Image: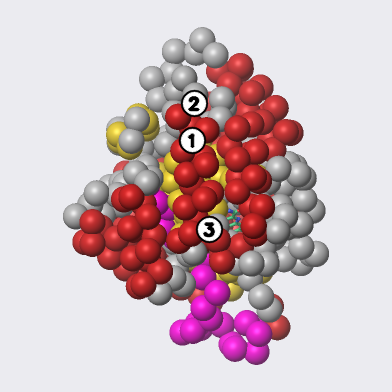
Amino acid sequence: MYRLLRKFYFTFPPERAHYMAMHQLQLFTRNRLGKSIIQSFTNAPLRETRFLNLKLKNPVGLGAGFDKNAVFLNELEALGFGFVEIGTVTPLPQDGNEQPRLFRLPADKALINRMGFNNDGVDQVARRLEAWRSKKAGSQEKYPLIIGGNIGKNKITPNENAWQDYAACFTKLHPFVDYFVVNVSSPNTPGLRELQDKEALRKILLNLAMINNGKAFAKPILLKIAPDLTREQIDDVIALALEIQLDGLVATNTTIDRSNLNTPATEVEAIGAGGLSGKPVQQKSTAIVQYITEQTNGAIPIIASGGIFTASDAKEKLAAGASLVQIWTGFIYEGPAIVKNICTHL
Ligand SMILES: Cc1cc2nc3c(=O)[nH]c(=O)nc-3n(C[C@H](O)[C@H](O)[C@H](O)COP(=O)(O)O)c2cc1C
């Protein structure tokens, strides 16, 4: 069924297809009956999972960048996700890069994107999350949808002031999300990945830890890293994570590497800059999860992201040491029953 739908959606530019599909799903899930019909197709078997202080109905989440503005939580909940990471959110709204900025590479089951943190800004996203929380207040759900807040900096903010952007997003989203991810690994904001340097990271993360400690309920803080880090850089991240008792890592974001693709080189070159996701990043991400797990004896909790399409891909990440998995590109290629399909065979 999804094969046909996918053929249809793939006749539209990727970004347009994304919003079209989500708005169509929204039409169905707007009322209770429609939502329960969708759920009858997507209902995933329960795979209760504990992660940090969180209880999830399953370990399969949606990666950041899919619902940047927290507008599709009801729809994503209907598709069975155990958790959804909204964002990347920045303090001020941003348009992101010029379109087209999202490209399909079907021969590689991959995408290239240079979205550039297009988002409505933290104030509006916080208001939406507040509305979601108040709609859910008093509901007796045993496994409420877990929501992560992925935070970043505005393009116009110089790197030396980046810590203030992360602090602003952290403070405003704090009451409404279950965990945070500090994103310093997107290739599409100039200079952002330099913040993966140990000293820059220390400043950002220690400041967030301080704000967190002042709250009645602290929220877990994780750091999302790029798959292109050298072993030395990963060692630095590990050392810092242990030193400041970071709650965990998200491994990994998209890659800037273009090697070993089936898509003709001329086509790839014509697409230009951006982060590559999907199957080509799978092995790299798994290797990083495995490396961190081995170096730390599993002391750092990990959410794995990169090239997960099937239950066996998810199992590969869990066997490498991850506790949870996130999908993004797999959702585009496999369709709305992906969570059910993964959970059925986990
Ligand atoms: C179009 C697109 C936009 C993305 N936006 C973000 C983002 O805003 N923040 C972020 O941390 N990751 C972002 N990502 C990265 C994904 O969350 C994920 O880490 C990456 O795509 C690897 O997983 P996958 O192979 O399952 O796609 C984006 C990915 C895509 C394809």
Dividing the picture into quadrants, the one containing residue 15 is: bottom right
Q: Which residue in the structure is indicated by mark 2?
A: 214
Q: Label 1 vs label 3: CA separation?
A: 16 Å
> Is 314 in front, or is 134?
134
Q: Indicate the amino acid at tag 1.
A: Met
In the rendered structure, which segment of residues is drawn in magenta?
248-269
Q: Indicate the amino acid at tag 3.
A: Ala
Q: Does the magenta stretch include residue 70?
A: no
Q: CB atoms at circles 2 and 3 under 8 Å apart?
A: no
Residue 186, how many percent across, how many down?
58, 61
> Is 2 in front, or is 149?
149
| Residue at point 76%, 67% (across, down) | 100
Q: Does the magenta stretch include residue 249?
A: yes
Q: Which residue in the structure is indicated by mark 1?
A: 210
Element at label 1: helix
| Residue at point 49%, 64% (across, down) | 197
Q: Label 2 vs label 3: CA separation?
A: 22 Å
| Among the two numbered marks 1 and 3 on one chain, the one whose residue lies closer to the N terminus | 3
Q: Label 2 vs label 1: CA separation?
A: 7 Å
Q: Indicate the amino acid at tag 2.
A: Gly
Residue 26 shows up from this direction: no
| Among the two numbered marks 2 and 3 on one chain, the one whose residue lies closer to the N terminus | 3
> Is 11 in front, or is 167?
167
Q: Quick check: 149 above or below 242?
A: above
Q: Which residue in the structure is indicated by mark 3?
A: 200
| Residue at point 54%, 53% (across, down) | 183
Dividing the picture into quadrants, the one containing residue 28 is: top right
